[in-house]
Amino acid sequence: MPSNLSSEPVDPKKPWTWAEAIWRERVASVRAGRSLKPAAWKDGARMAVALSFDSDHETIDLRNGGASAGRMSQGQYGARSGMPRILDVLERHGVPASIFMPAVSAMLHPEEVRRVAGAGHEIGIHSWIHEFNSVLDHETERDLSLRAADALERLSGTRPVGMRTASWDFSPYTLAIIREMGLLYDSSLMADDEPYELLEKGEATGVVEIPVEWIRDDAPYFNMDRMASARPYGGPAMLLDILRREVDLAFEEGGLFQVTLHPHHVGHRSRIFILDEIIRHAKAKGDVWFATHAEVARFCASEAGTTAC
Ligand SMILES: [Zn+2]
């Protein structure tokens, strides 16, 4: 077996030519380690519910190099109409949430940061300007991650403890940066329904993963690009049905229900009922712990006695 795999010639277009050591190295780079699903959730609750909202707003167009007033206005809708509606629903139900914000979005909407933080919700890192990490070198991704954390801390008064990569684009450097920053958790990967510990090249990191899924994300169902051939399918009732089924089985399995919603998608008049209904559905089960991603990660880490937390 070669000692320095990264120096081996590897043709990215011909994976069938790769030595076994090469594909094994790639798979092992970032991997799900032990499950951190606790025997019971806080105060003996049977299910944990972790609601999250990615306040991308105008950065979706900005990160594509855009300057479209039309697309920018869709982003502004998220801040101006969507988020206030979401925060009202959360307040009415008295449940916490995690809001992941690109630093540029937070700087464009400091009043949203203040309102979110003031209501006791968590604010997590979500890139600088919604950039794709996989096109960056290590130094640039590190610099943007650190600056994003600084900006959120400056605006919210609290240093973020968790990261969600923009578009869930987890680069070969992301985990090293998360570890260097001493973050409690990541919420960008999809190896399980339940929280787990991240492994880096086989080594336990103590970093908690709060897994996400496109299935439990409103963007694939609602995202509309006039010029793209793929269009949204289904409607709001379909998404509610999917999320209800996710809640039902999470409860049955004594697990975590996690969801990712966007103010510019779910915040519309014809869609906000999804959030309201899903909270009601979970509450109706009784014995449910609503928590931020940070609270879930902290609880799992302390139950499992992981080292880095
Ligand atoms: Zn995002």
Image (spheres, grey):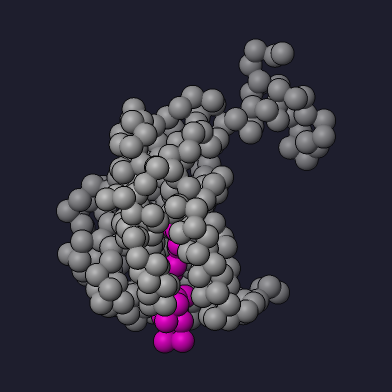
Tell me the residue at 46%/81% (across/down). Answer: 271
Q: Position of residue 196 (x, y in %)?
A: 46, 40
- Total number of numbered labels? 0
What segment is highlighted magenta in the picture? 257-275
Tell me the residue at 20%/66% (across/down). Answer: 119
Asked which quadrant contains residue 88, the reply is bottom left
Tell me the residue at 78%/36% (across/down). Answer: 15
Q: Is residue 32 above or below residue 279?
A: above
| Relative to 160, 49 lies left or right | right
Q: Which residue appears farthest toward the bottom when viewing the image?
A: 269
Q: Is residue 90 above or below residue 164?
A: below
Along the line of sight, the residue nearer the viewer: 200 or 38: 38
Q: Position of residue 121 (x, y in %)?
A: 25, 61
Along the line of sight, the residue nearer the viewer: 283 or 144: 283
**In magenta segment, residue 295:** no
| Residue 216 appears in the rendering | no
| Relative to 111, 259 lies left or right | right
| Residue 121 appears in the rendering | yes
Along the line of sight, the residue nearer the viewer: 68 or 163: 163
**In magenta segment, residue 263:** yes
Tell me the residue at 48%/47% (across/down). Answer: 194
Image quarter of the C terminus: top left
| Relative to 259, 233 lies left or right | right
Q: Position of residue 57 (x, y in %)?
A: 40, 69
Along the line of sight, the residue nearer the viewer: 37 or 59: 37
Image quarter of the N terminus: top right
Q: Position of residue 184 (x, y in %)?
A: 33, 40
| Relative to 119, 103 lies left or right | right
Asked which quadrant contains residue 23, the reply is top right
Asked which quadrant contains residue 55, the reply is bottom left
Q: Is residue 11 above or below residue 82?
A: above
